Image: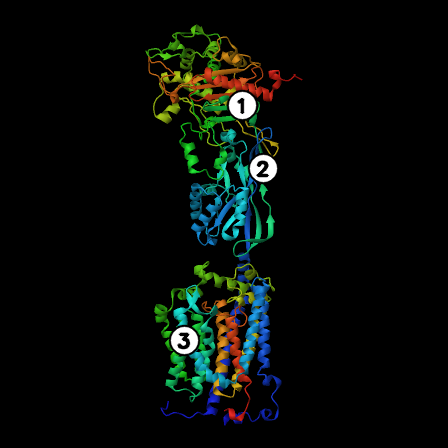
Amino acid sequence: MSPVVTLKDPSREAHIFTMRTLLSMLLVVMLLGLLLARYFSLQITEYEIYRTESDRNRVQLQPLPPKRGLIYDRNGVLLADNRPSYLLSIVRERVPDLEATLAELETLLPVSENDLEKFHQRLQRRRPYEAVPLRFRLTEEERAKLAVNRYRLPGVVVDAQLLRHYPQGELFSHALGYVGRISEQELWEVDETNYRGTHHIGKIGVEKFYEDILHGQVGYQNVETNAHGRVLRVLERSDPMPGADIYLHLDSRLQQAALDALGEQRGAVVAIDTRTGGILALVSKPGFDINLFVNGISSKDYSALRDSPDLPLFNRAIQGQYPPGSTVKPIVGLAGLELGVVTAQSTIADPGWYSLPGDRHRYRDWTLKFGRGHGAAVDLHSAIEESCDVYFYDLAHKLEIDRIHDFLSPFGLGDRTGVDTTHERRGVLPSTRWKRDARAEPWYPGETLSVGIGQGYMVTTPVQLAVATSVIATRGERRIPRMLRAVDGQPQPTPDLEPVQADPANWDVVHAAMRDVVHGEKGSARAQSKDIQYTMAGKTGTAQVIGIAQGERYNADEIDERHRDHGLFIAFAPYENPTVALAVVAENGGGGSSVAAPIARQILDAYFSLFAPEVLGLVEEP
Amino acid sequence: MGDYVRQMPDAGAFTRRPSVWQRVHIDLPLLVLLMLLTAYGLFILYSASGQEMGAVVRQGRYFLVAYLVMLVAAQFNPTTYRRWAPLGYLVGVAALLGVMFFGVGAKGAQRWLSLGGFRFQPSEIMKLMVPLTVAWYLADRSLPPAFRYVLVALAILALPAVLILLQPDLGTALLISSSGLFVLFLAGIGWRYIIGAVVLAIASAWPAWMFVLKDYQKQRILTLLNPESDKLGAGWNIIQSKTAIGSGGWPGKGWLNGTQSQLDFLPESHTDFIIAVLAEEFGLRGVLVLLGLYLLILLRGFWIGLRAQTTFGRLAAGSLTLTFFVYIFVNMGMVAGLLPVVGVPLPLVSAGGTSVVTLMLGFGVLMAVGTEKRTVANS
């Protein structure tokens, strides 16, 4: 370029400008063409991709959780229902300052330490756009306050949901079980698709056992949502199938009567309808309010329940393993008769103790502390009526352990009864094989004697005792005990098992002896025959909790309450045509006759007033 | 001399009286095109703002003011702009310095100057002042400009560009630099400078990445290259806008029926991303109509430049037209995922007051150039 100042040349400048402008125009048209090509490629070439993407954006498949089936007792009394409940949730993503929002909320409604703790736990597991519950069961007033302040609380949402509620509270705690918030692990075990949108699942008991029936089938809806996830329109909907309502054999009035009869006594009661195997009452005391568990129990409440020495969370009726004590004597006696070891007429002499041949150890009779035995000629009838230990030591010795095991086993002892609830324990019905497997030790003859009176290694659950009693009452009919009576009005049969075969005469002997336990002159529970308007058969049992050394005496007043004997009583009634079998365990209650038998009597009185008032003369027989 | 000769065939300039439009300094084709464009824009805005009439009325008021500003601006003789451009430029630079020290802003950017309760964005006025000042500077030189004049011209455009870049406002800095560069280009700057500049730009990409660009700006470029890398964060906008555009197809989903925009998936739907609403609801057809309107406006702008009487007028008209094009290209390119996201509105369609007024002021100047009396003495 020339350093000399050039003169302006308008014509050349105009030419340059025109050329540059034309070049610009060309460039502009080309670039606009590029833009057009880009929009063409997005809108025409890749149209399908973006169309799908846009639909996926706005349309969401939402699960519609089914309504959980209700639970009724045999008379249609509601035991578990669903109540609308409002909960306060927070969508993390939409909250500008979480701490400030929580602080603000605390000024509006009570938020406990526990609520916050659980909230923060949940918050870590959820995605930022999911609603994380903070408070459940909002009151009308709390909801109103939140509604008024809504504009100040972005990201705070109030949702309605149906929540399990147990109107009877503590009465059915162990009979029903409860639902609770579903856990990660439980989601693994169920069909996850069906549980989309379900927050609760049966955790224990009937609620867990019949989860499949109660839960129902999830429904779906296709909804159009905006970018914030708000539902604007339902495009398509398939309704959920609600869970079926179930009716249990339980009778809430009998359940209440059993609970009342136990009073302050720790223990368990199981009552079975001998004709159907249906469980009429199942009580474990103490219980707890099952409603506490529905939305996650607070750690304070939970530790109180867990650490209570009374073990309220422990379902004694199906998990409590107690030595059956003398309650096994009728069955051991029947074994003696059936296997021809004894006859109804054969007797033994009872000095108050028994020794094995060639052994100086004295196995004591419970009467020894009074310095006497049951007399010089004790037959099976009086051995059952008066609960003579020496007779059964002798009988057990003659039967030997494996024959006892094999005979008692069909009565349901020492194995799960298969009752339709969860967490049932097996108990132990010992045998030589069992001892070899469980303890890797041989069986000693002395141990057979303990089993003959329901002690030693033998432990049974109250529900097993009730089942065994039902087998006795029905002369051998065996059924799996059932809680479930009907589903949506359809009766559910109780499964029958192969019956126990025994000579009717032998049944007669055992039945008569059990009748005389209550109604006989020397019956161990003869106090219960007072003012009785029906005939019942029973058997007392006293289970030792601690061993008593040779030559020592058991004195209830001197030992710790928790080491006192368990009192047991089994019963069936009416004697002539049994309809109900009952097992009562009074934990550390002392004696079977003094504590457990009166409880059984009280429950049976209630049973007849409810089920057969004519037996009590309350109504005219038709 | 050349001008004289060129205008000889146009004998009407001597014989025919100037038309009514010429006398009121209105370029009728440009006005009609602008009115069609703004009407189309308002139509889309109603949908994009969530069918809120208030937003449309507000934007309509801005347009009213902007048209008035344009018509007033069109009345001045181009010479007046040439004369006052440097002063406006200096005032603008002073205001930009003011922004640096006393400015107010939001989201980490200082862009406004508050004058007695009135907020004002000096960078906007510079969009006009920079090309006019560069045009003023070069119009007096012999063209193509000598190297030293090119340097001065570059300095003129670089000073405000850097000040704006510091605010930081990459989009506006880019627009202002390019408007100045367009003047240089139209003035016939040698190809070696242009090629040299392109080479320099490519070479400086790495140092710019390392030392000049801020993290969020780098993020935008990375997001452009791979929007899926941050689906819910920075990539969200671009994914949603592409989805909106693509799902519109050829016919579009229909006015007010765009799911992406009506259901709030599309961010900034009434401002920078409004083209996505148009593309979704009116389809490629609607995009073609818009591009057609823009093309006609651009051609008219170039036509005015080609027919301008003076060098200043040509340079001003040409560069303003090209700047208008940059708006279109950058905005439509970024929304469609061709360019990184920078804050450039779709001209005369996106909601907003300041940019509309500035743009129309530019068209006012364009009209002033276009309706300048054709006299022989003018050269």
Q: Residue furthest top?
A: A376
The residue at which mark 1 appears reads as A257
How far apart are the alpha carbons under marks 3 and 2? 80 Å
Q: Chain of mark 2?
A: A
How far apart are the alpha carbons under marks 1 and 2? 29 Å
Instruction: Classify 10 Å Cα crowding around label 2: few (below 14), some (14-19), many (20 and above).
Output: many
Mark nearer the viewer, 3 or 2: 3
Q: Position of residue A40 (x, y in %)?
A: 54, 69
Mark nearer the viewer, 1 or 2: 1
Please tell me which residue lies in front, A477 or A385.
A385
Instruction: Classify 10 Å Cα crowding around label 1: few (below 14), some (14-19), many (20 and above).
Output: many
Quarter of the C terminus of chain A within the rendering: top right
Please tell me which residue lies in front, A363 or A317.
A317
| Residue B8 figure quarter | bottom right
Q: Position of residue A267 (x, y in %)?
A: 46, 24
At x 60%, y 49%, the residue is A237
Q: Position of residue A362 (x, y in %)?
A: 35, 12
Q: Is residue A22 above or below residue A31?
A: below
Mark nearer the viewer, 1 or 3: 3
> Of helix, strand and loop, which one carries label 1?
helix
Among numbered discs 1 and 2, the one appearing first in the sequence: 2
Q: Amino acid at mark 1?
A: Ala
Q: Amino acid at mark 2?
A: Ala
